[in-house]
Structures are given as structure tokens and as C-alpha cells.
Image: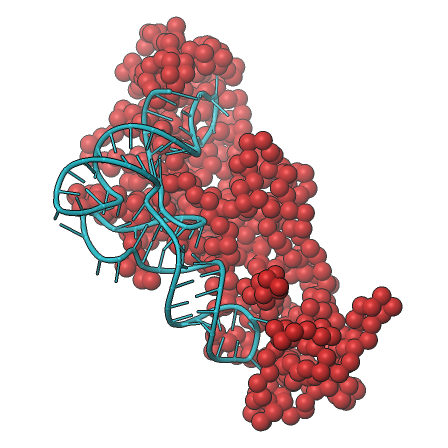
Chain colours: A red, B cyan
Amino acid sequence: MSESERSLNFLEHIIEEDLKNGFPKDQLRFRFPPEPNGYLHVGHASSICLNFGLGLRYNAPVNLRFDDTNPAKEEQEYVDAIKRDVEWLGYEWSTERYASDYFQQLYDWAVFLIKEGKAYVDSQTSEEMATQKGSPTEPGVESPFRDRSVAENLALFEGMKSGDFEEGKHVLRAKIDMSSSNMLMRDPIMYRVLHKEHHRTNTDWCIYPMYDWTHGESDYIEQVSHSLCTLEFAMHRELYDWFLDQVVKDEKVRPKQREFARRNLSHTVVSKRKLLRLVEEGVVNGWDDPRMPTISGLRRRGFTPESIRNFADTIGIAKRENLIDVSLLEFQVRDHLNKVAPRVMGVLNPLKVVITNYPEGEEEWLDAENNPEDDSAGSRQVPFSREIYIEKEDFREEANKKFFRLKLGKEVRLKNAYIIKAESCTKDENGNIIEVQCTYDPKSKSGSGTEESLRKVKGTLHWVSIEHAIEAEVRLYDRLFTDESPDTHKDKDFMEFINPDSLQVVTGYLEPSLKNAQIEDRVQFQRLGYFCVDPDTSPEKLVFNRTVGLRDSWAKIQQKS
RNA sequence: AGACUCGUGAUGUAACGGUUAGCAUACAAGGUUUUGACCCUUGUUGUAAAGGUUCAAAUCCUUUCGAGUCUUCCA
């Protein structure tokens, strides 16, 4: 679908409307404003794609702004991780900004508000203020400090800034309306004292502005035209606008906050606290564990930036509650990897096959197409010999005709190689099949063009020559939670829904072309799925992660019977 | 319950008073295939409910029902 045909989402409609009403297109500006207090996750990815996508669509700048107003939780490490993730997704920000860049301006404006009689220093405890705040149905009562003189407010605020007071002693509040039906308008706090070192401003400040006071003004300073955030900030809009009203100049762009529904992905959790528990309780192996919904986790799992962007595009954006099935994401990664991932062969659950009429000690190298979806991908050679591995699931002594794979007396095609026929098999003392003896048709070589090679055989198996196979650790991932919405149960902890089989580690036997695979390389193990090379890989040991399996209609057929 | 936001198939989204409510996924049937993949064809399920306005309503109005958000010196 071309960009121009795509239907508009409600935010694009708003922008189009603004443009129609005379807002200059070249003044469109967006921003992505993460707080650097943790790792970005798939929900942020949607927001990134939304904001940067609008930037691309309207050829407008997009700032990356760190909302770093709470030094207690923020660290440089997160700033770096966030920048890496945004870059990895393939976006370029116009300028890198920090709310902390605006501390002085924000302070000056706060002084201005005090002078205007629109802000005051409150010297009560937080408990006192909380009780005075009232409830949604009951109006609040005004603080006894609400009518302090401008001079006194100025002096106290100056004292707060200079470090004369300990934390909690005083706060600066906006003087709005203690009986507003919107709790946020009941004299919200603008500044609190925090004797904490900030990762950028160090000890320059010991008062820090609150989110509401900071965000709109930062948007204004940066001249962001459309400030997009999630629905939980809808109620904040009134305050956002009130704060803007105090400082906006007519000739400048007045930012407009609009809210969209956060994207919820099934079978996962994204709250920082919950993710942290998964890490701390050892359910996963870190923030970038391939089962984590963090962008770093998705990256390590083998997801491509394109697939995540396409995912964000297809799910779109709206205002209603949603729970997006993770299979939509999986479809996107299969769709992309199908086009770009080289095909290789690897066996994860090996069963030995001996081709009895193939000469002992002989080997030959057969042509194998790298990617049928991509003509430019070329081909490689894979070794064939008398003893090979196939998957255990691909052989049965006997089976009905729905089973296209190898069974006694029947033929299958070995991908890129010959047609073989199962003659007999041997079992161990427990009755487990440990080896299959086959014969091959020497004239049936793939691509040879002989009559025999053109023979239609229903099943095609992947395989690997035992002698040439290289071993690798293969990590098979499944969804982390068995419940589609693990953290929405009132009476149950989300940890109760952990999938005990979310990780299975096996030894895989791979074709030798994989010997020099590099970290983050992505391939398709034919008939199995898409895999990528994990950073745990060393010269001694190859490690693969399964990104996602192939669609498996055989599994469905089996389930039915 | 006060305010705010929102209800379109199994999931996500579109239609901005005017075709048989579209698209993607999912599911199903068939075709193709040296991957039971991909691809192709066809099919299946939907406007929360009730009223009203209108020649015409998913769309506008009213009511009901349902969901979410808000009551942190977090963002």
C-alpha cells in the first residue's frame, strides 16, 4: 500500500485540519520524550514510530527529548540505551534535547508566576496537602499558605533554590482552583526540593520541576506543534494548557497536546516494575533477554527494525482500549525475514540416517539456493555424505498418507540433494528408533534435470551431513506468559502466568557454511523457523536464538486427528 | 458514584451523513511448491443496546449498558 493511499489515523486528521486552517506546514514539529529511567519497550516503539513517522510524512523535524526532571530515578546509562534503540529502529532525530536544559528558563517563568500571584510556596506536609485536596466528588480546601505575599513567596522560593531547606519542607504550587472537578487543577505542585545529584546538571539545582510544569513549557521552548502522548495524560491537558497560557506569546507556535491509546501487546507485561521483577527474580537473564518486550530484547531475539516499524504501521493508532495479539508482530517479522534471511539447513532433534548404497568415505558438495525470494542472493555448497541427520519427527515406521515425510518403503526428497527411500530401521532396547537405513537414487540429484530428479515426491526434508555438521547451542523461545493479559487479573499476580517452557536449549547440527556466522546474523533454518546469532557466541561456541517459527500447518493437521 | 475518554468480526484498524461496512492478521477450503514455509484463489464472522432526527445513520441527538483513566513532592 503506498503512503498516499493509506487512510489517515485520527492524529493525522487533526494535523490535516490544522493545516487546512492555515497552520504553516513548515512549522510542524514533533518530539519523542522518554524519561531516562529504564529501557524502552515495544510500547515505546509504537510511540517512536508514530512521532518519527509523522516527521517523515510531513517532512518535519522530530526532537529526541529526555524528560529528566527526577534525578532520583534517572541515569546516563538509560540515555545511551534509549539513543541506541531509537537509532536501531532506523530513525534520526533533529536535535537531542533535555528538559534539564530548560531548568533556568523554567525557574524564571516560575518567578514570573509568583509575581503574577499565580504561584505560591506551600509549607505543609504532603499528607496535609493530600487531605486538603479533597476527592473527585468533594471539593478541596485551600492551603493556609495560599495567600502568602509575593515577597514572602519570592524569598522562600529563592531559599528553596539555594538549598536552605530540606526535602519536603516547602513546595511551589500553582494557584488555580481547589474545587475543580479535575484533581490536577487543584493547585498542582510545580517544584519540589530534591537534594540529589542530577546526571547532567550535577548539583547545580536542588529544586526540580514536576512533569506538568515541565512538559508543555519544554514543548513550547522547542516549538513543538503537536505533542502526542498516551491517554492517561488526557486529564493533564487542561493543566498543560493552563501553564502554556501563562507564557505563550502570540507570534510563536502554541503546542497542542493530543492523546492516543497506549498499545498493549498480548502475552507480555511492560511496566518497569514488573519487568524489573522478571530480571531480579531470575525469570529472564536480563533486560535484553530475548523473551523481554524491551527493544533490546526484541533486537536480541532477532526482530528487525523493519518488522517493528511495519507492525506499528499496520496496527495503527486510535483512542480505544486494545490488546494486540502478539501474532501480528510475529507475522511482520516472518514477512520481512522471508524476504531477506538466507536459507540454511540445521537439524535440532537428530536422527541418524545411513544411505546404504552411497559409497563409504565419499562426499560431494551440492548447490543450494540461498534465498528463493531473492535472485541476487546466489547459492552456496553443502556437503553430502553417507551418514546424515534428519529430524526425529520426520521419520515414522508407518503412517497414514497425510504424513508426507519419511516412512518405511516410501521416498522423500532431501532438500538440494537426492531422493531417498527408507528400507529399515534399528531401535534401542527401549524401542526408540536410533537409526534409519535408506537407499538413494543416484540419478535424482536436485537440479540435474534428469527424469529421475524431476520425479514428484510429496515430502522434502532438510538434513545435514554428520561428518561435516557443526554444533551450536540453539535457544528456542516461546512466549513468556501463558495468559494473554497477565497483569490485568485483579486477584492474581502476573508471575502466576509465567510459561515454564519459555526457553528450551538444544544442541543443533548445522551445515558448515554457518561456521563464520556473525553476531546478529539472521537466517532461516529451513522448515524450522528464523534464527539469529546471539551475542553469547564465541569462537568456540555458536549460539542461535529462534526468533520465530515458520507457520506450521502440519502441527494443525496433527492436532485435529 | 464526580469529571474525562472510549465501545466496528477472533485481533488491530478504516469509512468524517450517501455503494454489497474496506484493509491487514486469524480461521477455513482449494491451487502451487525441491521449505506442510512463502505465494495465488475463494470463503467465514462485525457497527454494544434501545429510541429519535433524516429520503438516507457506524457516523448526528437522547437514554441505557460496558470498559478505561484521574484522587503520588513519578513521568
Question: In the rendered image of this protein, does residue A53 appear above or below residue A130?
Answer: below
Question: In the rendered image of this protein, does residue A416 appear above or below residue A521?
Answer: below
Report whether residue A531 is seen: no
* Residue toward you, A38 or A451: A451
The single residue placed furthest to the top in the displayed view is A144
Rendering coords of residue B26 (x, y %): 48, 58
Residue A67 placement: quadrant: top left
* Residue toward you, A146 or A153: A146
Rendering coords of residue A77 (x, y %): 55, 41
Residue A552 placement: quadrant: bottom right
Question: In the rendered image of this protein, does residue B33 appear above or below residue A185?
Answer: below
Q: Is residue A537 left or right of residue A292?
A: right
Q: Residue at x 30, y 45 (%)?
A: A10
Q: Is residue A401 left or right of residue B12?
A: right
* Residue toward you, A428 or A385: A428
Report whether residue A4 is seen: yes
Question: In the rendered image of this protein, does residue B38 appear above or below residue A333?
Answer: below
Q: Residue at x 79, y 71 (%)?
A: A433
In the picture, which quadrant includes the C terminus of chain A? bottom right
Q: Is residue A13 left or right of residue A470?
A: left
Rendering coords of residue A463 (x, y %): 67, 75
Q: How many marks?
A: 0
Q: Residue at x 50, y 67 (%)?
A: A338
Q: Is residue A200 left or right of residue B59?
A: right
Q: Residue at x 51, y 57 (%)?
A: A330
In the picture, which quadrant includes the N terminus of chain A? bottom left
Rendering coords of residue B60 (x, y %): 21, 37
* Residue toward you, A513 or A208: A513
